[in-house]
Image (spheres, grey):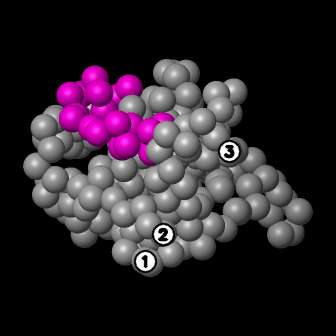
Amino acid sequence: VKNNMNKDNTENFKKLLMATKRIGIEAVLNWLEHATDFFTAPASTRFHSSYEGGLLEHSINTYNALKVLNETELTNRHLLKDTVAIVALLHDICKANTYKVVDRWRKDKNNKWEQYKTYEFNEDEPLGHGEKSIFILQRLGLQMTEQEVYMIRWHMGGFDESKLPLQSAMKKCPEIALIHAADLIATHTIESEVTDD
């Protein structure tokens, strides 16, 4: 288990969200800071940012990617600055409190068994990925636009396990494509590659 904790990321994350002045944002930040491991959690068990502080780093990376996509002339869909922050920084809060450190065994380069620490996913709220983030945010009282709800709910795009129709959601909110692209850019072009474990 590596550590990529960055105090600047934490302060930047909080500053960007507080700047939205959105009703409920203080409750969200208070919950993240005092009731979760969001700022220290990994973003995955091994696929990307699978180290301490990885979830926060992934959220910042997704924000930076969405910000750039939103400022390009490639699309005629432009988001409000607050929407970029809310959607990108909070799309994966469903992952808070879901990873635990466990001991595993593997063979080293000399074919000898060694023990190592890694993360294991442990979900106790089986609501679905995007749905869980929305559920948490609404429970905490965050005021969100319909567009923001759709974007967070469907940020996984075609990788979503739901049988609900993605195409119907994208007809209603084409900006889903922007957060999905930003998430993919952060995951596959900015962050770490798959490890051997």
- Report the Cα–Cα distance between label 2 and label 1: 7 Å
Left or right of 154? Residue 97 is left
> Amino acid type of disc 1?
Thr
Quarter that holds the C terminus: bottom right
Q: Residue furthest bottom?
A: 73
Q: Earlier in the sequence, mark 3 or mark 2?
A: 2
Q: Judge depth for marks 3 and 2 and give the one in front.
A: 2
Label 3 element class: helix
Q: Residue furthest right?
A: 111
> How far across and how far down the image is residue 104, in percent?
69, 44
> How far across and how far down the image is residue 29, in percent?
20, 43
Residue position for label 1: 72
Q: Which sits in the foreground, 55 or 127?
A: 127
> Amino acid type of disc 3?
Phe
Quarter that holds the N terminus: bottom right
Q: Which sits in the foreground, 107 or 148?
A: 148
| Magenta extent | 135-154
Residue position for label 3: 159
Q: Main secondary structure of the magenta part?
A: helix
Left or right of 13? Residue 62 is right
Say if residue 102 shows up in the picture. no
